Amino acid sequence: MPTFEPFAALRYCPEAKLDHFLAPPYDVLSDSDISALKLCSPHNIAWVDDPDESDPDRYAKSAEILTSWIAQGVLVSDPQPSFTIYRMAFTDATGSSREISGVLGGLEVVDEGAGGVLPHERTTPKASTDRLDLTRATATNMSPVWGLSLAQGLTDVLRAPGELLGTLQIEGVTHTVERVSDPVRIQAIQGVIASGDVLIADGHHRYGVSRQYRDEVRAATGRHDTPAEYTLTFVNELVASQLSIEAIHRLYDGVSVEALRDALSGYFELAPLNADDAPGSHHAPTPETLAQMVQLGRLVLLHPDGTAEWLTPKPGVFDGVRALDGAWLEHALNSLDAQVTYQHGLAEMKSVVRQHAAGVLIRPTSLEEIRRTATEGLLMPPKSTFFTPKLLTGFVLRPLA
């Protein structure tokens, strides 16, 4: 089972304006997002975590900025090892009020296939060494991995508040962090997490980079007891009340929409979104369509003009295939040489599909399938889950030296 360790966290000073200093994770930010964050403050974490790609010395500059912030007292170190409870309160897509509570600490970096820390989906190749180069230069974990504990009781152990350090509201989500430095409570949190596997929900690439960095430190020092043996991770319990999962939809290129329809028709019945429509008519999907997809067990083919059709699975065609929309599409389109990319959000899909051959709206992955993935050692197709809300970067940094 994985080891989960407290550490002396590096944090913004108590006087810091957190709403000006924190940022979403690097992998959901556009160039314009990064520019806007940097305009918020010369101390926004984006200056370190999202260096200018056009600058050949960007990683060294990130390290210089981080060092200068520490020297200036912008960032201060905790006096002793601690955990950080991180809570996110929000209204989910169904209109229900929710609060997700997890804990930030150092999760053991294990070898691939060793168990304890488990992947839940296949990852897409990433040619860039950006995160590894940044970690080498700064010797710091910044954006946390998101892990799901299969052990029971973590939610209960985190229920009592810790020492309040900061709270802010961004885009309808209230983010709150609380420090836990009491040894008895630290031991209780460790004990629960150590009693079950941790499934990586978000941050597979970050965890892989941590493994590469750990191996480099081991080779350079001959030691297996440095901070590189662990990586900054947010862990919450794998239960319905502690998860908000949305779909990551598919966009297709390299084929025509007619070829896609022909391939899909072997596995799905295609029909207008509105049952009263005449054949061949395709209304645009709405948020209500997403709810109907779950209720009716259907997918939606999205045309480049934004109109759409139902995709209803034919009886028996997916026998023996994982009950995942992504797996169904891989199976149905296996004979096509189509390129697939991924996009979250209905509004975003309707906007970008104009530049693609077509898109398919899929349903969120169920909690049951996520648990099955963990217990049976299976892997989902790439981009099967989109966990929301996204964790902010900058609440806690974890030094590696």
Image: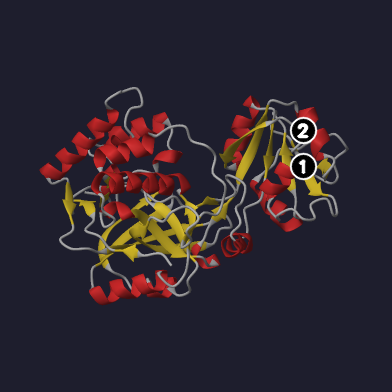
Q: Which residue is mark 2?
A: 260
Return the mark for residue 30. none
Q: Which residue is mark 1?
A: 332
The residue at 62%/55% (across/down) is 365
Q: Amino acid at mark 1?
A: Ala
Colour pattern: secondary structure
Q: Name above or below for residue 36 compared with residue 331.
A: above
The residue at 37%/39% (across/down) is 131
Q: Name above or below for residue 57 compared with residue 361.
A: above
Is 235 situated left or right of 91 in this image? left
Task: Find residue 257 and report its horizontal and vertical position in percent.
Answer: 76, 29
Mark 1: few/some/many CA within 10 Å (<14, 14-19, 20+): some
Q: Name above or below for residue 355 compared with residue 290.
A: above
Is 309 situated left or right of 247 in this image? right
Quarter holding residue 213 = top left
Q: Quadrant of the N terminus?
A: bottom left
Q: Nearer the viewer, mark 2 or mark 1?
A: 1
Question: In this view of the protein, which residue sits in the foreground, 329 or 220?
Answer: 220
Q: Describe the element under mark 2 as helix, strand or loop.
A: helix
Q: Amino acid at mark 2?
A: Leu
Task: Find residue 26 and report its horizontal and vertical position in percent.
Answer: 39, 40
Quarter holding residue 155 = bottom left
Task: Find residue 299 and report its horizontal and vertical position in percent.
Answer: 73, 47
Sequence-wise, the earlier of marks 2 and 1 is: 2
Question: In this view of the protein, which residue sits in the foreground, 163 or 254?
Answer: 254
Q: Describe the element under mark 1 as helix, strand or loop.
A: helix
The residue at 72%/43% (across/down) is 329
The residue at 24%/31% (across/down) is 60
Q: Are marks 2 and 1 in contact (CB under 8 Å)?
A: no
Label 2, label 1: how many angstroms apart (C-alpha)? 10 Å
